[in-house]
Amino acid sequence: MGLAFKMLSYNIARQSDFRARSGPGIVGRQKDFYLLEAIRRKPLPNACHTPAVAPKTADLPAAGHGQPRGNLYYMYGQARNEKIKHVTEQKVRTARPSRSSGKTLVEQVRDRLRAQIESGQYAPGSRLPSEAKMTEEFAVSRTVVREAVASLRYDGLVEPRQGAGVFVLDQRPELDLPFQNIDFVRISSMIEMLELRTAVEVEAAGLAALRRSPAQEELILQALAELRAKAASGEPTALADFELHLAIADATNNPRFRDFLSMIGASVIPRHALSDTKDAATAPYLQAIDAEHEAIVTAILDGNEDAARLAMRLHLKGAQSRYRNLLRKSAQ
């Protein structure tokens, strides 16, 4: 039960010894025993929010048995709070996603939200709980919740509305689309997708250098600045990285490039598998990626088609090389 419960047991035992020596009879000790049992057995229907409720006067030992009644009220409250804390910690451990599954916290929260939507818990048109409530429900940070919701938005399951919240969209009939059965945990799958991206995005960078508008240049610079801000603050950068590649695809003024990237999704951005942990890429890795992104953006803004293609090719080839090194290490 905790320290307060042990203190209460110790004090009641001392009172019982004192009354046994002074001859008050067994009635006081029985009341102490029943009070102790009431604290231990009292149910907690909602332990996270149940306040410490003082016992009824009839439950307390009568005054004059060596213990002021006010102290017993205090000790009861302390023991009650210890029990609440114990049950609350159990609930949090149960709610927090487990890392043993091999998925990041973002992926686990995303999958649980997806399951809730598909099961009908959140019907089309209904609003998802607020960020604060979801952080409490899943026992994760607001950043993890935002990344999970953004992933669902890319999948067409939810739609954020300014000032109103995030709403569930009508579910479209499932189609047998390509790139839906890719195992992103397998390094070989990531290498395959990077080879495909290289074939598409190298051309996209060249076209963006030729066709971009001033407004599209501004969006590319904004995406790069957002990516750098997240990296500097230690936040996950995979989705911000994906937004930069989407901005470059938009600058081609050919909507099929964005359609292709949206179809394969943000999961193809090399991040988690190249870091020491599942939540954040290492600093040297992020610095190298930032230099590669800067070279791509500079070439596009300069209108240098060949340099833009070369920079994008080096960027994606570098990602392939890093994954191949990981594949070799995993085989050792």
Image (cartoon, grey):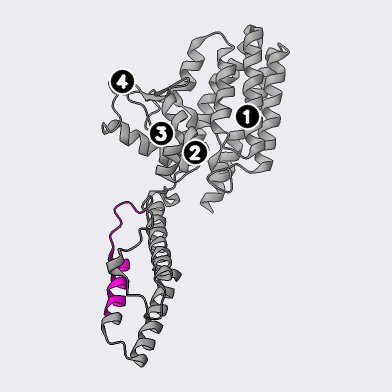
Q: Which amino acid does label 4 sit on?
A: Asp
Q: Position of residue 305 (x, y in %)?
A: 68, 13
Which residue is nearer to you in this view: 1 or 269? 1
Choose top left, top right, bottom left or bottom right for residue 252. top right
Q: Residues within 10 Å of mark 4 (few under 14, many from 20)?
A: few
What secondary structure is marked by label 4? loop
Q: CA–CA distance between discs 4 and 3? A: 25 Å
Of the residues shown, which amino acid type is indicated by label 3?
Ile
| Residue of label 3 | 182
Relative vertical location of residue 197 with respect to residue 191 in this rendering, above or below: above
Q: Which of 299 and 91 is in front in this view?
A: 91
**Which tag, 1 or 3, sits closer to the chain's start?**
3
Tag 3 or tag 4, which sits nearer the N-term?
Answer: 4
Where the N terminus falls, by quadrant?
Answer: bottom left
Q: How far apart are marks 3 and 2 (CA)?
A: 23 Å
Residue beneath label 1, please? 227
In the rendered image, the vertical position of residue 274 relative to residue 299, given as above or below: below
| Magenta residues (range) | 30-47
Confirm whether residue 2 shows in the render: no
Q: Is residue 33 magenta?
A: yes
Reading the image, the residue beneath label 2 is 144
Separation of residues labelled 1 and 3 (CA atoms): 26 Å
Distance from Cα at disc 2 to Cα at disc 1: 16 Å
Q: Mark 4 highlights which residue?
A: 170
Quarter residue 304 falls in: top right
| Distance from Cα at disc 2 to Cα at disc 4 | 24 Å
Q: Can residue 332 be seen in this view?
A: yes
| Amino acid, disc 1 | Leu
Q: Which residue is drawn at 64% across and 38% down?
A: 233
* Disc 2 residue type (three-letter): Val
